[in-house]
Amino acid sequence: RCAAACGGGGPALVLHVGDVSYARGFEAEWEQFMDQIGAVAGRAAWMTAVGNHERGWPGSGAARGESDSGGECGVPYARRFP
């Protein structure tokens, strides 16, 4: 669908702004997400911005002290998107 929407050539850049995988502490969710984006990310620049579901945890330095990350505190996100 993505290639068709971009005129057949596919996108040159994907901007993924926050709430990247919604894994909330489950490694399998990260792996599934990476598998899902693989076909496009292998051909286009994939730029991300950390969101509350990657970073949010009390005392983690997140902008808000919510527990949206399931305790990940940005670690799995930072390993995959340095």
Image (tube, helix red, strand yellow):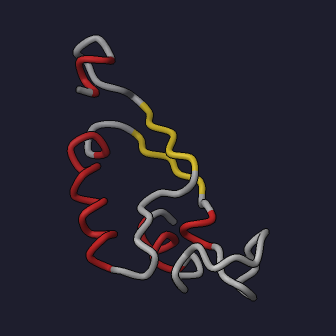
Counting from the top left corner in percent of width and height, residue 40 is at 27, 40
Q: Quadrant of residue 61?
A: bottom right
Q: With 5 as the anchor, is 19 left or right in this view?
A: right
Q: With 61 as the anchor, is 72 left or right in this view?
A: left
Counting from the top left corner in percent of width and height, residue 81 is at 47, 63
Q: Is residue 45 above or below residue 63?
A: above
Determine the residue positioned at 31% across, 70% down.
Answer: 29
Counting from the top left corner in percent of width and height, residue 19 is at 53, 57
Q: How many marks?
A: 0
Q: Quadrant of residue 23?
A: bottom left
Q: With 58 as the anchor, is 73 left or right in this view?
A: left
Q: Residue furthest top?
A: 7
Q: Is residue 82 above or below residue 36?
A: below
Determine the residue positioned at 57% across, 54% down.
Answer: 18
Determine the residue positioned at 44% across, 65% down.
Answer: 22
**Nearer the observer, 4 or 81:** 4
Q: Check the picture and name the quadrant holding the N terminus.
A: top left
Counting from the top left corner in percent of width and height, residue 60 is at 70, 84
**Nearer the observer, 29 or 7:** 29
